[in-house]
Image (spheres, rainbow, N blue to C red):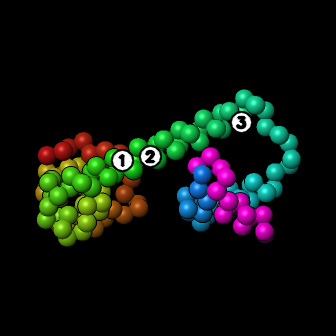
Amino acid sequence: MDSIKEISQKSDNVVNAPLRSILDGPTLMVVTVEATTTRGRELATSKLQTIHRACSMTLSLDRAKHILTTYVQSRMNLFAPNLTALIGSLTAAQILNFAGGLTGLAKTPACNIPPLGSKNNKAQTGFATNVG
């Protein structure tokens, strides 16, 4: 148990930050348990390089996501100022994305807005295609 706490709190890793500050609880548990229950075989150099490249790509994607999220949040006051004032810039951007843009949101009946953000809504994912 002490090794799991040590892994989650140490910051001498690829990201130079404690894993607890990066991963959510369940993911942190899986990573630390897997790290402490290995069979002791070393990875081949090619596999280790592949893992490092994948980690670097994941970190780059996370940075890009943060930059895009910050940009979209900064522009929401221009696109939908009333909606942003009511529910915040991030939630407003997500609702616009689910609705397919401003025109899609304007055409959506009020009774259909709460399900837009539900976890079961898998009909539309990704970026809005009907930006109005």
As helix, strand or loop, the secondary structure at mark 1 comes to helix
As helix, strand or loop, the secondary structure at mark 2 comes to helix
Q: Which residue is mark 3?
A: 48
Tell which circle, 2 or 3, labels the residue nearer the N-terminal end.
3
Whether residue 65 sits left or right of residue 36 in the image: it is left
Name which quarter of the figure residue 35 lies in.
bottom right
The answer to whether the residue labelled 2 contacts the one labelled 3, judged by CB atoms less than 8 Å apart, is no
Q: Which residue is mark 2?
A: 63
Please tell me whether residue 58 is drawn above or below residue 108 in the rendered image: above
Counting from the top left corner in percent of width and height, residue 123 is at 35, 50
Whether residue 77 sits left or right of residue 114 in the image: it is left
**Which numbered marker is on residue 44?**
none
Residue under the image location 33 percent in, 62 percent down: 117
Q: Which residue is mark 1?
A: 67
Residue under the image location 61 percent in, 59 percent down: 18
Please tell me whether residue 57 is drawn above or below residue 94 in the rendered image: above
Over which residues does the magenta segment extend?
Answer: 1-15
Q: CA distance from mark 3 to mark 1?
A: 29 Å
In-front residue for pair 115/73: 73
In-front residue for pair 12/75: 12
Q: CA distance from mark 1 to mark 2?
A: 6 Å
Residue 95 visible somewhere in the drawing: no
Residue under the image location 13 percent in, 51 percent down: 103
Counting from the top left corner in percent of width and height, residue 56 is at 56, 39
In-front residue for pair 120/40: 40
